[in-house]
């Protein structure tokens, strides 16, 4: 099972009226009917989040750090000049969708989860370039496996001259347009035999920004866990968690700083991380025709430890830091 959509029965919908969100409700209708003049079609006023529900060994259904998804989606709504989601509405929608689709939550031990996709779009008749008057908030879900084929195996990536987002643009929020911009360079990389692309900073193309739809991190030869510092990358919840685990569980030093592509030999391990990817080890990066391999090309020791920690926390085999896990009680 990968990330091809397997439809579940229920989803949640809520709309704004006079600038305020209604309470919303579950529906089995998979289709959304909105006006052809809606902003989401013409001016890209749409954004989304991604999180997962896991079935733990003790049978509990849990979410991983959903409070951070709530903060991030509202930061994105601010950027799109759209009304913020109330905390009660955000979490009620997710809870109701998980409970209603409980039979589609993969069992413990399969390495699978229920991916949850909350999104907000601007709708209604609008021809001028301005924020929408009306909005839709919806949540749907699907059982998923691993994002990249092969599970925890090291993959090959290549840099691209294309940019995913601009400096001080919308790279720090999960707007749909960021992903539209990534499709063509991703396809070029796939056609050339790579798992995906490495985006460089849009200002100078000299520093690593992101790995396709995931964040980049690496381990230096003296065991420092490093992530890029940039104004054009998404603040990943998984990346933040990796830095915490590296420091507090593994006792390693961590740094958020510039990662120059011409200096990637400073790293003995590298990886992509995110809600979908979790952790995907990077075997090698090809840049301007030159291929750099990390270590022996296999999954590095530190990356394996971080992966095992995350997976263990997700499924309840390792005690999570306080506040990281939110249980959804199934009636």
Image (spheres, rainbow, N blue to C red):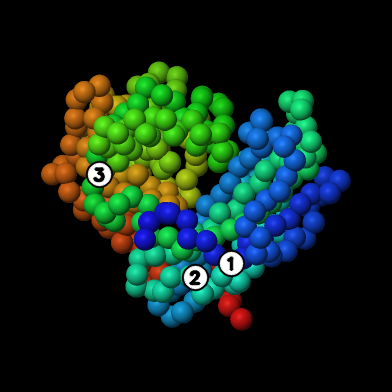
Image disc number at residue 155: 3
Residue 9 is marked as: 1
* Cβ–Cβ under 8 Å for marks 1 and 2: yes
Q: Nearer the viewer, residue 63 or 25?
A: 25
Any part of residue 207 in sight: no
3 or 1: mark nearer the eye: 1
In contact (CB < 8 Å): disc 3 and disc 1: no
x 42%, y 49%: residue: 274
Q: Nearer the viewer, residue 167 or 192?
A: 192
Residue at the outermost left position: 296
Q: Residues within 10 Å of mark 3 (few under 14, many from 20)?
A: many
Q: Quadrant of the C terminus?
A: bottom right
Residue beneath the point at 55% across and 26% down:
168
Q: Residue drawn at (42%, 30%), measured in percent from left and top?
A: 184
The N terminus: image quadrant:
bottom left
Residue 157, image quadrant: top left
Q: Give the alpha-carbon distance from disc 3 to disc 2, as whole Å.
A: 30 Å
User: On the picture, is 251 further left or further right than 235?
Assistant: left
Q: Is residue 269 above or below residue 182?
A: below
Residue 152, x across and y down, in percent: 27, 55
The relative height of residue 247 versus residue 157 in the rendered view (above or below) is: below
Query: Looking at the image, is mark 3 or mark 2 nearer the viewer?
Result: 2
Q: Under tag 1, what secondary structure?
A: loop
Instruction: Using the numbered discs, state the Cα–Cα distance from disc 3 to disc 1 in whole angstroms.
Output: 35 Å
Q: Earlier in the sequence, mark 3 or mark 1?
A: 1
Extreme top residue here?
204
Q: Nearer the viewer, residue 182 or 59?
A: 182
Residue 104, numbered circle: 2
Residue nearest the viewer, comparing 266 with 233: 233
> What crowding class fits label 1: few (fewer than 14 Cα within 10 Å), some (14-19), or many (20 or more)?
some
Question: In the shown orientation, is residue 324 left or right of residue 292?
Answer: right
């Amino acid at each position: 099972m990968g990330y091809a959509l397997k439809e579940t029965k229920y989803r949640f919908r809520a709309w704004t009226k006079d600038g305020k969100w209604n309470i919303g409700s579950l529906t089995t209708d998979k289709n959304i009917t909105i006006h052809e003049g809606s902003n989401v079609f013409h001016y890209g006023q749409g954004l989304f989040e991604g999180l997962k529900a896991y079935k733990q060994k003790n049978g509990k259904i849990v979410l991983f750090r959903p409070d951070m998804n709530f903060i991030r989606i509202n930061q994105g709504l601010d950027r799109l000049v759209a009304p913020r989601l109330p905390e009660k509405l955000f979490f009620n929608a997710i809870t109701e969708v998980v409970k209603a689709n409980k039979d589609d939550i993969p069992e413990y031990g399969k390495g699978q989860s229920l991916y949850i996709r909350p999104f907000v779009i601007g709708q209604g008749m609008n021809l001028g370039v301005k924020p929408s008057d009306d909005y839709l908030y919806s949540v749907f879900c699907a059982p998923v496996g691993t994002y990249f084929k092969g599970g925890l195996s090291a993959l090959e990536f290549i840099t691209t001259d294309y940019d995913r987002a601009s400096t001080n643009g919308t790279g720090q929020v999960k707007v749909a347009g960021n992903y539209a911009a990534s499709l063509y360079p991703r396809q070029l990389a796939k056609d050339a035999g790579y798992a995906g692309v490495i985006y460089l900073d849009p200002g100078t193309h000299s520093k690593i920004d992101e790995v396709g739809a995931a964040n980049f991190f690496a381990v230096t030869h003296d065991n420092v866990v490093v992530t890029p510092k940039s104004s054009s990358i998404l603040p990943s919840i998984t990346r933040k968690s990796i830095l915490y685990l590296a420091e507090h569980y593994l006792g390693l030093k961590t740094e958020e700083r510039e990662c120059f592509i011409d200096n990637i030999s400073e790293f003995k391990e590298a990886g992509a991380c995110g809600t979908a990817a979790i952790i995907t080890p990077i075997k090698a990066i090809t840049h301007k025709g030159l291929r750099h391999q990390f270590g022996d090309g296999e999954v590095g020791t530190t990356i394996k430890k971080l992966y095992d920690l995350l997976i263990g926390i997700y499924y309840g085999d390792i005690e999570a830091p306080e506040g990281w896990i939110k249980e959804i009680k199934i009636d």
